């Protein structure tokens, strides 16, 4: 914590000491996950003018972890006002807060900062798909959504279909004499409730699901086997009247199992892969009841929480949990899995590219247990707020999801939906295109074209036909691939692409550069090496570092060809007077020559000349309205061969 140095009066000393004591108290509350209490103390201190980056982080985090992103964003903004020296994660969190305000332009600026400051996969996903909002738009407007009918002012979310009912989680008061309050959110601890499904798909008549499954701590997110006789559910670390804590004396979440005996739930037991030291929560079952999926932060987790799977053996024992891998899991939160009867896998994530907060994503599990590409289910199910706990009836395509979006009744609310247009999971793409010589644009036959996946594993090879065409079939949509083109007379060319969405083809024209460039007196080496501009700062003639990279190429050509001589020709655009531009171009051509001499080229092999605005390559002369791009075409340098 940043100390306050005061030497003015005893009053100020006492003020600083008082504020630091309050911050220390807030830190204690914060570290105990009592975020609501921490917020109150931190904000009172901040309102009195106490400013500290660590405090602003913690206020922001306190709201962020409670999904109050607009408030979190205000404090992250204050953090960035006083320092930019922060962990990259804060760029990401602030971008999520900005998405909550639908300020996607600024959110993407902070995603840019995040991707440059970190090797995190979330940043890589963004740099590979900066047009992600357009992709989400394509999967949007497929649903009709409505309030489910049983929401309260408290948190209501989940849940699972069970017989002709729906079992969900709620923090509504159960009517006890002393309402137990959870320190994290200052809401009542959650219980499992059940509601009846009407023919219109609404929920009615909510009531406590089972007294036997109700403890004095949290119960949530239940899932049932197909025969209805086994339930898996989430509860705080509490069994048979005993509370369990981790090494920091914190009660975490565990998965439990119960079976139905004589119409009631009994034989409650915790699952064997639970631990006092990490969370396991939010179970989901495969259609055959042989695989249990869940969220956890156990060892081997990539992010804040990952989705795992574990085999349920015929004798009821369990295998070893397996992380679903980095195709699904990110450094953020992946949680609340659900698997439909047709093996459609839905989950909530704030690590994949979305509209803000937790978004709901989906993929399909293939027969060989591989996954299709992951799709954002789009709006109106997803929003700039937290959207999660998606469940769907495979036959009716109706279901429920939860959200803390504006316009609801409580902290979280349950919404019913009808999917009117299905997602296309097994979309296949072909990659096809043309290989051409970049200078002449002529097609190149018999060039080797090799295809790699995003991990640079070779997955296909072919050769261009007599017309320079190539193609690869049966590829995934919206997937990263690399193409490498090789031919004896040309430089190796490699580029990364992302296939288009849906079924179809992705067309890629590949320009090929000759290894050996044929030049003659009068040839411009700048064109041979695609040097468009040697950049100078405004009204300056010194060589900048970025320009030096291109000049080094020309120097190496001259060293390899000791009889070659060149003339450096510098040009300007038409802005400013002719006399000014002529002098400026002469200074820049001479500065370029001087740099090359300094780097080993004899001065008798180089001449320098400035042409000002006398040789414009387009019509952008005085009095003509041109774009910046058109003016830039005239601000060029040439390296013309005068002798070989």
Image (cartoon, rainbow, N blue to C red):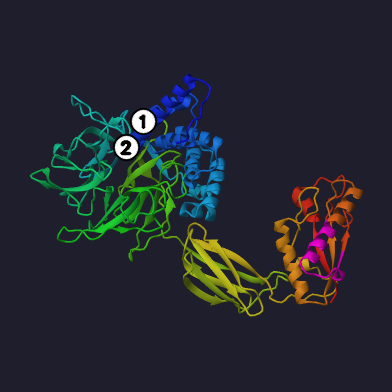
Q: On screen, 574 above or below 481?
A: above
Left or right: where 296 falls relative to 546: left
- Number of labelled discs? 2
Judging by the rendered image, the residue that carries numbered circle 2 is 32
> Predominant secondary structure in magenta?
helix
Q: Position of residue 525 (x, y in %)?
A: 78, 68
Q: Residue at x 50, y 50 (%)?
A: 135
Quadrant location of the N terminus in the rendered image: top left
Q: Residue at x 25, y 41 (%)?
A: 251
- Residue closest to the eye, 557 or 326: 557
Can residue 227 be seen at all in this image of the molecule? yes
Can residue 408 be seen at all in this image of the molecule? no
Q: Residue at x 47, y 53 (%)?
A: 120
Give neighbour class at mark 2: few <14, some 14-19, many 20+ (Cα, 10 Å): some
User: Which segment did they paint magenta?
Assistant: 588-607
Give neighbour class at mark 1: few <14, some 14-19, many 20+ (Cα, 10 Å): some
**In magenta segment, residue 603:** yes
Report which quarter residue 382 is drawn in.
top left
**In magenta segment, residue 373:** no
- Residue closest to the eye, 211 or 272: 272
Quadrant location of the C terminus in the rendered image: bottom right
Left or right: where 256 falls relative to 495: left
- Residue closest to the eye, 12 or 493: 12
Left or right: where 137 falls relative to 420: right
Q: Position of residue 400 (x, y in %)?
A: 33, 42
First in sequence: mark 2 or mark 1? Answer: 1
Report which quarter residue 323 is drawn in.
bottom left
Marker disc for residue 276? none
Q: CA distance from mark 2 to mark 1?
A: 11 Å
Judging by the rendered image, the residue that carries numbered circle 1 is 25
The single residue placed furthest to the left in the displayed view is 262
């Amino acid at each position: 914590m940043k100390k306050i140095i005061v030497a003015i009066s005893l009053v100020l000393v006492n003020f600083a000491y008082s504020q630091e004591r309050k911050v220390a108290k807030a830190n204690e509350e914060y570290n105990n996950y009592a975020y609501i209490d921490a917020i109150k103390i931190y904000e009172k201190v901040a309102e009195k003018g106490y400013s500290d980056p660590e405090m602003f982080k913690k206020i922001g985090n306190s709201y962020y972890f409670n999904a109050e992103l607009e408030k979190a964003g205000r404090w992250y903004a204050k953090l960035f006002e006083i320092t930019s020296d922060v962990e990259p994660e804060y760029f990401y969190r602030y971008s999520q807060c900005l998405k909550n305000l639908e300020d996607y332009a600024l959110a993407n600026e902070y995603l840019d900062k995040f991707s440059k400051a970190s090797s995190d996969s979330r940043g890589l996903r963004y740099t590979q798909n900066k047009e992600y909002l357009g992709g989400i738009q394509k999967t949007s407007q497929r649903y009709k959504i409505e309030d489910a009918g049983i929401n309260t002012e408290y948190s209501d979310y989940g849940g699972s279909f069970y017989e002709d009912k729906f079992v969900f989680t709620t923090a509504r008061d159960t009517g006890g004499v002393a309402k137990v309050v959870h320190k994290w959110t200052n809401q009542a601890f959650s219980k499992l409730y059940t509601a009846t499904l009407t023919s219109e798909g609404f929920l009615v008549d909510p009531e406590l699901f089972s007294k036997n499954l109700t403890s004095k701590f949290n119960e949530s997110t239940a899932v049932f086997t197909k025969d209805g006789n086994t339930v898996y559910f989430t509860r705080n670390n509490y069994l048979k009247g005993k509370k369990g804590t981790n090494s920091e004396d914190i009660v975490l979440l565990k998965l439990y199992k119960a079976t139905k005996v004589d119409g009631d739930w009994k034989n409650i037991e915790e699952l064997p892969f639970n631990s006092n030291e990490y969370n396991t929560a939010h179970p989901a079952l495969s259609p055959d009841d042989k695989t249990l999926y869940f969220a956890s932060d156990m060892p081997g987790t990539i992010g804040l929480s990952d989705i795992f799977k574990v085999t349920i053996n015929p004798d009821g024992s369990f295998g070893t949990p397996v992380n679903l891998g980095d195709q699904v899991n990110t450094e953020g939160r992946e949680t609340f899995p659900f698997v439909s009867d047709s093996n459609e896998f839905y989950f909530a994530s704030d690590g994949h590219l979305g509209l803000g907060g937790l978004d709901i994503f989906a993929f399909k599990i293939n027969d060989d247990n591989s996954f299709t590409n992951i799709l954002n289910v789009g709006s109106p199910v997803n929003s700039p707020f937290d959207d999660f706990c998606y469940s769907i009836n495979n036959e009716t395509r109706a279901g429920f999801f939860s959200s803390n979006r504006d316009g609801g009744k409580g902290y979280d609310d349950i919404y019913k939906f009808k999917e009117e247009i299905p997602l296309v999971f097994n979309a296949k793409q072909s990659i096809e295109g043309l290989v051409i010589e970049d200078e002449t644009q002529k097609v190149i036959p018999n060039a080797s074209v090799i295809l790699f996946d995003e991990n640079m594993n070779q997955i296909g090879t072919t050769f261009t036909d007599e017309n320079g065409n190539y193609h690869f079939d049966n590829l995934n949509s919206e997937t990263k691939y690399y193409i490498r083109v090789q031919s004896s007379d040309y430089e190796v060319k490699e580029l990364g692409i992302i296939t288009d969405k849906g079924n179809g083809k992705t067309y890629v024209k590949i320009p090929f550069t000759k290894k050996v460039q044929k030049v003659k007196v009068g040839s411009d080496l700048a064109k041979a090496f695609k040097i468009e501009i040697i950049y100078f700062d405004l009204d300056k003639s010194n060589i900048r570092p970025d320009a030096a990279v291109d000049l080094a190429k020309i120097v190496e050509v001259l060293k390899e060809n000791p009889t070659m001589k060149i003339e450096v020709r510098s040009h300007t655009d038409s802005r400013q007077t002719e006399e000014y531009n002529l002098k400026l171009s002469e200074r820049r051509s001479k500065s370029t020559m001087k740099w090359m001499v300094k780097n080993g080229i004899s001065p008798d092999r180089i001449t320098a000349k400035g042409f000002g605005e006398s040789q414009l390559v387009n019509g952008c002369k005085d009095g003509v309205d041109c774009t910046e791009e058109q003016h830039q075409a005239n601000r060029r340098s040439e390296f013309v061969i005068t002798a070989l």
